[in-house]
Image: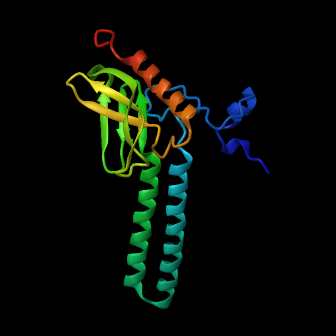
Amino acid sequence: MPLPFLTADRVFEASGETSDDVALPFDDHDQWRRPYRPGPWRVGAAALLLLLASFVLLAAMVIAFTGAVSGAGVCFGLAAAVIGCALRLLRVGAWVSRHGLRRVGFFSTTTVPWDRATHVRTVQQPVRWLGLPRTVQGQALVLQGRDGERLQLLTDHNADFLSRVEAFDRAADTVEAWGDEYRPASVA
């Protein structure tokens, strides 16, 4: 039983688009948005964390029914922490708006206004494979700041784009287009 009112794909079905790599349409450029869909590795890891959290919640319920309230509280706290980690994992990535560019990491978030950016471009460099210490040769989307800071936004070997070269190219082009549109002309 399809429920088209629950999905954003109804816009693409009406226009004939069926690819899963097409970015979702947005109208309000003041809202922060990710200009690409989260990749299968990121979604799969978050799904596994949520599955683990469901088992921990089940264990907490069983412990609570046996009368060990302190043990149940510890399990509920652990499940809440795992759910929080899964949600944060889904938010990791590059986000854009009219105000600037935001790189959301698991532990930190960096926001750079467009007027502090000199350019956004794709470069060939060693990149981390799935965020692990191992590096491989790949492509990275890099934001160069006015003060010389260099912020790596996306790589073709992270959890969103591993084995999805076309999706990386499309996302990099989209972020570069946002930069070209909203960066002041005097900075370029």
Q: Is residue 187 left or right of residue 20?
A: left
Q: Which residue is drawn at 42% across and 52% down?
A: 88
Q: Which residue is most to the bottom?
A: 66
**Residue 51 at what x, y percent from top left?**
55, 66
Q: Residue at x 56, y 38 (%)?
A: 164
**Residue 77 at what x, y percent from top left?**
39, 71
Q: Residue at x 43, y 27 (%)?
A: 30
Q: Which residue is most to the right?
A: 1
**Residue 159 at what x, y percent from top left?**
48, 46
Q: Which residue is most to the front?
A: 137
Q: Which residue is drawn at 53% across and 62% down?
A: 48
| Figure coloring | rainbow
Is the C terminus in the top left, top right, bottom left or bottom right quadrant? top left
**Residue 138 at what x, y percent from top left?**
43, 36
In this view, 150 is above or below 4: above
Q: Which of 105 and 84 is in front in this view?
A: 105
In this view, 142 is above or below 185: below
In this view, 122 is above or below 59: above
Q: Which residue is most to the top?
A: 186
Q: How many labels does the image show?
A: 0
Q: Is residue 43 left or right of residue 121?
A: right
Q: Is residue 70 left or right of residue 87?
A: left
